[in-house]
Amino acid sequence: MIQKQKGTYDVYDEMGRKILYIEDLLKVLMEKYNYEYLRTPLFEASELFHRGVGETSDIVSKETYDFIDRGNRNITLRPEGTAGIVRSFIENKMYARNDLPVKTWYYGPMYRYERPQSGRYREFYQFGVEAFGSNDPALDAEIISIPVNFYKLLGLKGIKVNINSLGDTESRLKYKEALIKYLKPHISDLCEDCQNRFLKNPLRILDCKVDKDSEILKNVPNILDYLNEESKTHFESVQKYLKQLDIEYVVNPKIVRGLDYYTNTVFEVEASVEGFGSQNVLCAGGRYNNLVETIGGPKVEGVGFALGLERLLTALEFENINLIDKKSVDVYIIPMGNNEKEISMKLLNNIRMNGFSADIDYLSRNIKSNFKQADRLNAKYIIIIGEDELKTNTITIKNNETKTEKKLNFDDIIDYLDKEFKE
């Protein structure tokens, strides 16, 4: 038997309804924030992720799905959303618009070849937001507020924001020099990955999962001590705006994020989910003022974040948050024979096109089995069409909760349903 691939999963039944609920909520939230939907291809030129995400990141060096297509082109399944959005921003010359900042959102599958575990898959769905054309710290605060408010709307408790600043290019270079000087005598005591990162991108060592609790990494220089005045002012302004938005935050100098393109503000959003362990970070992002230029565009500032659907679903499950009601339909139609089935199909379509959910018996069940099916579907009303109804051009409609019945003309059914559901 052919089975799904390792690190993937099927969506069906209640899980499917839950995911659709979350997707709908995200769409509504983005309308309120005035962000526009942007969709990019599932695969891009491999060079995009090598230049954008960074050669030294774990994503590019260990986790991408790469292949050569029939045109002998190096192709990569997208491992994250930002690089593709930036490519689209440049290619479609959105930077030339007169309504900056350009504020976009995306949602779709991403692919990383990593060890599957709870809330982490090789094919996973990511929602993200990217805004271009402004260096305003108020925009940083707005970006952070989106996932915070989204999680609160879903009912997650204990939402906390960890923020840090990597500074601009000048500040980052100063800190990089200090970090190299500090780590050099200790580098042989760190893991192999850290030793490789020391030569390529020493800031990535602060992200190490193996040595994160070592005394060496606990005592690294504080990156905030190396911010120049401009970077320091920007970071202080972000904090002021977060306070105005009533967003609780903690300044955490150890947050650097795993991608090479971040500058200035970086952040992680976590929830105090009981039993969730170290996987409580639900969302992360930050500012990337050099990324558009790195990928081949003009000098345009950017800021954004991404959150994983699977991690969110796990958190909701741990918190016993039920987002959806039981599956139900407004109307279930029972035709008593083939002749009645023809008029029933016409009625079914009419009911659906007037805004009600409806279903019909497709298995020629007996009346008792049909009532059981109506209960399984949590049908609010049952319509029975038999030989007598066909002769008199009427239907029998039954309230499945009160069990009361009523005879109606075919032409009156929509008005009746409108009135009943309005009440």
Image (cartoon, rainbow, N blue to C red):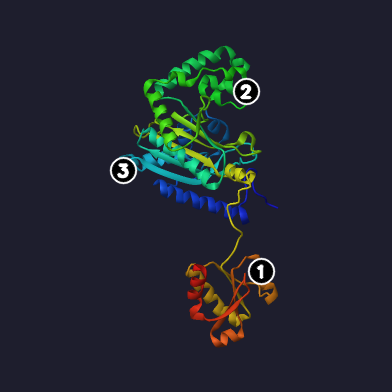
Q: Residues within 10 Å of mark 3 (few under 14, many from 20)?
A: few
Q: Earlier in the sequence, mark 1 or mark 3?
A: 3
> Residue at 50% across / 53% down in the picture?
24
Q: Quadrant of residue 102?
A: top left
The one of 204 and 269 positioned closer to us in this rendering: 269
Q: Position of residue 113 (x, y in %)?
A: 59, 38
Position of 411 relative to 302 (above/below): below
Q: Which mark is residue 373?
A: 1
Position of 274 relative to 387 (above/below): above
Disc 2: which residue: 213
Position of 411 relative to 115 (above/below): below
| Number of numbered tags placed on the structure image | 3
Q: Residues within 10 Å of mark 1 (few under 14, many from 20)?
A: some
Q: Which mark is residue 99?
A: 3
Whether residue 237 is visible, yes or no, is yes
What amino acid type is highlighted by mark number 1?
A: Gln
- Say what secondary structure mark 3 lies in: loop
What amino acid type is highlighted by mark number 2?
A: Asp
What amino acid type is highlighted by mark number 3?
A: Asp
Q: Are the residues tagged 1 and 3 within 8 Å (C-beta)?
A: no
Q: Residues within 10 Å of mark 2 (few under 14, many from 20)?
A: few
Q: Are the residues tagged 3 and 2 within 8 Å (C-beta)?
A: no
Q: CA distance from mark 1 to mark 2?
A: 57 Å
> Residue at 58% across / 26% down in the picture?
208
Using residue 372 as the reference point, say whether residue 262 is left or right of it.
Answer: left
The one of 146 and 91 positioned closer to us in this rendering: 146
The one of 295 and 402 positioned closer to us in this rendering: 402
Q: CA distance from mark 3 to mark 2?
A: 46 Å
> Residue at 63% across / 65% down in the picture?
377
